[in-house]
Amino acid sequence: MNMQNLMAQAQKLQKEIKAKQAEIDATIFEGKSEWVLVTMNGKREIQSINIKKDLLNDEDDLEMLEDMIKIAFNDALNKIEEEIQSKMGMYGDGLAGMM
């Protein structure tokens, strides 16, 4: 393979990666727990947090709510990571062979 073909292939790969990343960035992901729904975009920015307020009765519920927010937040982050692996994982394997 000559250098010109290699450069063209690298540019094509770079465009594909940018397009996939833009697609992931624009996707909305939901993380859920029993009391909380967190929505984030693929840039890992929180878009909204919805809490089932009717479940709060006392101080102990506040601690449980904090735990539920962490669970929902981490659930959304895991979904983003899965999407990145699904759409971008193949590029990681291909890039190793080009270097």
Image (tube, grey):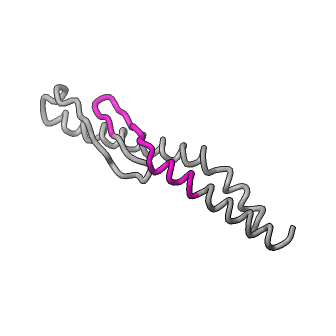
Residue 90 drawn at (x, y percent): 68, 50
The residue shown at (26%, 41%) is 66
The residue shown at (51%, 48%) is 23
Q: Is residue 15 magenta?
A: no
Residue, far left: 58
Q: In this view, does 4 lie to the left or right of 70?
A: right
Residues 85 and 53: in front is 85
Is the residue 93 above or below the residue 48 in the image? below
Residue 14 drawn at (x, y percent): 63, 62
Residues 77 and 1: in front is 1
Q: Quadrant of residue 12?
A: bottom right
Residue, far bottom: 3
Query: Which image quadrant: the N terminus?
Result: bottom right
Residue 89 drawn at (x, y percent): 64, 50
The residue shown at (60%, 56%) is 17
Q: Is residue 83 left or right of residue 49?
A: right
Residue 25 drawn at (x, y percent): 46, 51
Residues 28 and 81: in front is 28
Residues 48 and 1: in front is 1
Q: Quadrant of residue 71?
A: top left
Query: Which image quadrant: the C terminus?
Result: bottom right
Q: Where does the magenta region start and end?
A: 18-38
Q: In this view, does 52 lie to the left or right of 74?
A: left
Is the residue 10 above or below the residue 23 in the image? below
